Image: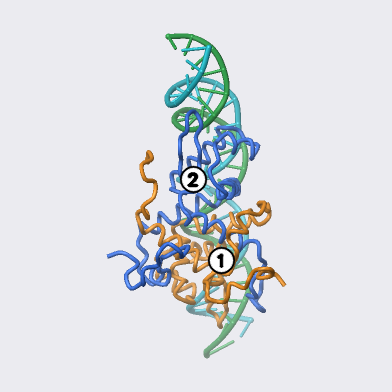
Chain colours: A orange, B blue, C green, D cyan
Amino acid sequence: MKSRSGKPAPDAKAPCAHDHALVLSLPPDPDALERAAGLFRAMGDTARLRMLHLLARGEVCVGELVAALGEKFSTVSQRLRVLRSEGLVRRRRDGSHVYYALADDHVKDLVANALAHASEPEPANTPTEDDE
Amino acid sequence: MKSRSGKPAPDAKAPCAHDHALVLSLPPDPDALERAAGLFRAMGDTARLRMLHLLARGEVCVGELVAALGEKFSTVSQRLRVLRSEGLVRRRRDGSHVYYALADDHVKDLVANALAHASEPEPANTPTEDDE
DNA sequence: TCGTGATTTCATCACTTAATGAAATAGCAG
DNA sequence: CTGCTATTTCATTAAGTGATGAAATCACGA
């Protein structure tokens, strides 16, 4: 009994069923604001973002991440802790190995969104303003 | 050779025309990764995120922001500088007043997305895993 | 030009955060 | 239990970041 209540049922096709316009017109709930900032903060690090990008393909165990990134175990583990504390990644244990993956498609979407945005120069914006 | 290749011309209706799945399957371009992290870093601050949320409704001049947030001019200005350096906000000068607004709908989407995500507890995830 | 309101820049200081080696913990095979 | 591999936790240290007052700009009207 949460969202999709009074809405005219936006069907199940949209990648994200949240009512963005509504959220933005609502008063900024301090708690949600803080959590959202926490999400961004955790993603606001090149190394961590790279990890998220790696995890976007699917489950990867810590050792693989260490190998793939060429970092120390403790470093990778710390980063994973941060990501997990913000609910960005999910953890699964299999024997002596621990597998990590993105928590949900929402995260995948955020990462993809930002990377796509960062990849393109500008979709024809800032027409004639002083820039830089 | 950029995006929107096989897409049937997404016209001006979709909120985001990027091919997310593609971006995630691509090798992590260091440069894009860094810029994306920069975006998140700039948004990863409660105060700045609150400002973005405010700006999501439309143009606001610095003085209004100062009044609305109850902060000092220099503080607000510094935050705006950070947001602008990451291309998150746009600036328009009108006489002695300066108006700020979100750079594009992409930013609006990111903010709304994160706030929506942060507002909901969990879409039925981490069923029986150790949490915390 | 001078004065004033609006906004930005600068230097500084307090606070936060990331990387890291060492030590601890967990799971498993002997 | 012992040893071994996989992973996390801890404490420390180095670097990064935000808020802020003072000074500098900017635009405008007298």
* Amino acid, disc 1: Leu
| Quarter holding residue B47 | top right
Q: Tag 1, which chain?
A: A
Residue A64 against residue A50 in the figure, above or below: below
> Taking the image as drawn, is residue B132 in sight?
no
Which residue, as the protein is rendered here, is positioned at the far left? B1
Element under disc 2: helix
Q: Which of B79 and A102 is in front in this view?
A: B79
Left or right of residue D2, residue A111 in this image: left
* Amino acid, disc 2: Leu
Query: Which residue is tagged 1?
Result: A88
Residue at 55 percent of width and 63 percent of height: A83
Residue at 55 percent of width and 36 percent of height: B62
Q: Nearer the viewer, mark 2 or mark 1?
A: 2
Q: Which of A131 and A5 is in front in this view?
A: A5
Residue A69 against residue D3 in the figure, above or below: above
Element under disc 1: loop
Left or right of residue C25, residue B3 in this image: left
Q: In the image, residue A72 lies at what x, y percent?
A: 45, 64
Q: How many labels does the image show?
A: 2
Crowd tier of the residue under label 2, counting other residues whose Cα lies within 10 Å: few below 14, some 14–19, many 20 or above: many
Q: In the image, residue B129 lies at what x, y percent?
A: 65, 77
What is the spatial separation of the Cα atoms under label 2 and label 1, in whole angstroms? 23 Å
Q: Tag 2, which chain?
A: B
- Of the 4 image quadrants, the one containing the N terminus of chain A is bottom right
Q: In the image, residue D25 lies at what x, y percent?
A: 42, 24
Which residue, as the protein is rendered here, is positioned at the far right? A1
Crowd tier of the residue under label 1, counting other residues whose Cα lies within 10 Å: few below 14, some 14–19, many 20 or above: many
Q: In the image, residue A7 lies at what x, y percent?
A: 65, 68
Query: Which residue is tagged 2?
Result: B83
> Taking the image as drawn, is residue B24 in sight?
yes
Looking at the rendered structure, which numbered label has been put on residue A117? Answer: none
